[in-house]
Amino acid sequence: MSQPLSDAGLEEIANDLYAGRKIYAIKAYRLATGAGLTEAKNAVDAIEQTLRATEPEKFTAPVSKDGCISVMLLLSLPAAVLALVG
């Protein structure tokens, strides 16, 4: 069973979300509450949804709908450069 989230913990998570660092927000939630990964992800998703509805101007990064694709492209870029150079 997880512990309640403190105000300081919520502020840290909100700052991570505003900056587009969702993975760090999930890690911070887990550390602050002792929650499992799925519970933390669901909680952070709910926090993000609330913050985007109430304070959208604070977000510096856009909503990522296809984050996995972005990561895959980023990871494949060096291989593509090597293929062109080699």
Image (tube, rainbow, N blue to C red):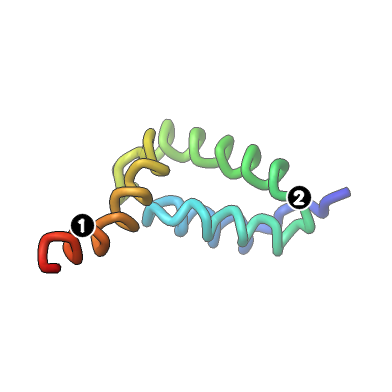
**Residue 43 percent location from the top left of the image:** 65, 41
Looking at the rendering, which quadrant does residue 52 occupy? top left
Residue nearer the viewer, 59 or 65: 65
Determine whether, in the image, residue 36 is placed left or right of residue 14: right
Q: Residue at x 30, y 42 (%)?
A: 62
Task: Work out whether 27 lies above or below 70.
Answer: below
Report the side of 7 relative to 82 (left or right). Answer: right
Residue tagged 2? 36
- Measured as percent of width and height from the top left, residue 79 is found at 26, 61
83 and 2: which one is in front? 83
Quadrant where the C terminus lies?
Answer: bottom left
Where is residue 47 drawn, in percent x and y? 56, 41
Residue wearing tag 1: 80
Disc 1 to disc 2, C-alpha distance: 37 Å
Q: Where is residue 8 drawn, in percent x and y?
A: 62, 63
Which residue, as the protein is rendered here, is positioned at the far left? 85
Q: Residues within 10 Å of mark 2 (few under 14, many from 20)?
A: some
Residue at the (43%, 35%) spot, across then down: 54
User: Label 2's element?
Assistant: loop
Q: Earlier in the sequence, mark 1 or mark 2?
A: 2
Which residue of the protein is positioned furthest toward the front in this rendering?
86
